[in-house]
Amino acid sequence: MVIFCGHFPDGAEKFARTARALKKAGAKDLRRELYRGVQRAAKPLKEAAKESARSTLPKRGGLAARVAGARYSTRTKAGRNPSVRIEVRDAAGRKVDVEALDRGVVRHLTFGHRPLVEQRVRPDWFMRPMREGGDDVRRELEAAVDRVAAKLVQ
């Protein structure tokens, strides 16, 4: 689920400009520093999403434990459409459909048999912590971009 692009358009453009300049300059160490800053900034959001999954999603059947125990990773794109995306993969490495879960829909087998059934769950468990922590993360992302941009100019 994209957490950066649509929510922080000014920061996304600044991030894209800095990343393009770093690529053009061939400054791999500064690019690495920029992406590490993005990782650091997104870490509290991942922890907040895990906690929200534990407290919001259904515990019976193990959905809350499975989603909270999944691997949350940050993917960064600095091209034409810059974004920071948090992806969620379960223990088997399969992508968790965070968008559907966040809309309040879970599709699953009943007692391991077909057909798939849809179950309603409480929506907005993922994006709520993203919005609540958004200002702090945006400031940290912009600070990381500014630090790297200042080093690039020197």
Image (cartoon, grey):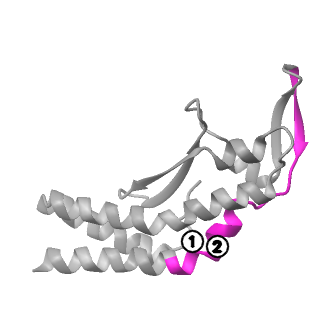
Give the SS element for disc 2: helix
Furthest-top residue in this view: 113
User: Which sits in the foreground, 84 or 17?
Assistant: 84
Residue projecting furthest to the left: 154
Q: Which mark is residue 131?
A: 2
For the record, the magenta segment spans 114-136
Q: Is residue 113 above or below residue 72?
A: above
Q: Is 132 included in the stretch rendered in magenta? A: yes
Which quadrant holds residue 116?
A: top right
Q: Is residue 11 visible?
A: yes
Q: Earlier in the sequence, mark 2 or mark 1?
A: 1
Q: Amino acid at mark 2?
A: Arg
- Residue 93 - label: none
Badge 1 crowding class, 10 Å Cα cut-off, few under 14, some 14 to 19, many 20 or more, is some
Q: Nearer the viewer, mark 2 or mark 1?
A: 2
Q: Is residue 13 left or right of residue 28?
A: right
**Residue type at numbered disc 1:** His
Please say if the residues under marks 2 and 1 sit with CB atoms less than 8 Å apart: yes
The correct choice, above or below, for 29 with respect to 59 in the image is below
Quadrant the C terminus occupies: bottom left
Residue 29 percent coordinates (x, y) = 17, 60
The structure residue drawn at horizontal position 82% and vertical position 52%, both measured from the top left corner, is 104
Question: How many numbered discs sit on the rendered protein?
Answer: 2
Judged left or right of residue 24, residue 102 is right
- The disc at residue 7 is 1
Residue 68, given in percent of the width and then of the height, sits at 66, 50
Q: Position of residue 94 (x, y in %)?
A: 59, 32
Residue 18: where, in percent of width, then height? 27, 70
Helix, strand or loop status at disc 1: loop
